[in-house]
Image (cartoon, rainbow, N blue to C red):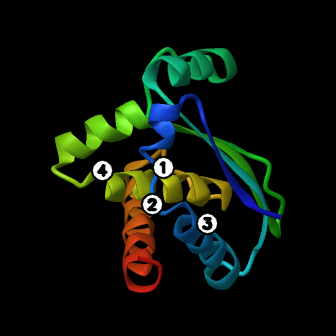
Amino acid sequence: MAVSFSYSNASIQKSVKNKNSIKGWIKDIIENNFKKNLGDVNYLFTNDTQILEINRKYLNHDYYTDIITFSYSTENIISADIVISIDTVRSNANSFGQEFEIELRRVIIHGILHALGFEDKTEEQKKSMTELENWALNLYAEKWK
């Protein structure tokens, strides 16, 4: 099973760097830290216009977002289709005073956390999710960078 990346256009493809280390990081988190098996995790990197269309069509939400996770995970196999808007990630990075690559990795792992079953609907869940994202980002910096 594998992690795959696809892009809605060539300029977006250039925005995603260190693909092999990101794939290794995702696999490490799923298999070594959560003791689950990696299934098929497919990322589609796109823009605001396209993620809004997907949000409207599949979730009946009429707003922009940085990420949409469609999880197909079972108890032991983590699989998902994850859509990420590079436009919103870049905008959020600027708003938060964060480097783009770090914000992108945060969003990438956010999708994995959803596929693992974590939610972020309540304030307590959001806090827990942010703590897990920070832990994962630190793991990346220590082991995969």
Q: Do the residues labelled 3 and 1 touch (CB within 8 Å)?
A: no
x, y percent for residue 79: 77, 55
At 62% across and 78% down in the image, what residue appears? Answer: 28
Query: For numbered disc 3, what is the local secondary structure?
Result: helix
C-alpha distance separating marks 3 and 2: 20 Å
Q: In the figure, 114 relative to 83: above or below?
A: below
**Which numbered disc, 3 or 2, marks the residue closer to the eye?**
3
Q: Can you identify the residue that label 2 sits on? A: 129
Q: Residue 23 carries which label?
A: 3
At 36% across and 69% down in the image, what residue appears? Answer: 134
C-alpha distance separating marks 1 and 2: 7 Å
Q: How crowded is mark 3: few (under 14 residues within 10 Å), some or many (20 or more)?
A: some
Q: In the figure, 88 relative to 115: above or below?
A: above
Q: Are marks 4 and 1 in contact (CB under 8 Å)?
A: no
9 displayed left or right of 77:
left
- Residue 82 figure quarter: top right
Q: Can you identify the residue that label 4 sits on? A: 100
Report the quarter where the C terminus lies: bottom left
Query: For numbered disc 2, what is the local secondary structure?
Result: helix
**Label 4 sits on what residue type?**
Phe
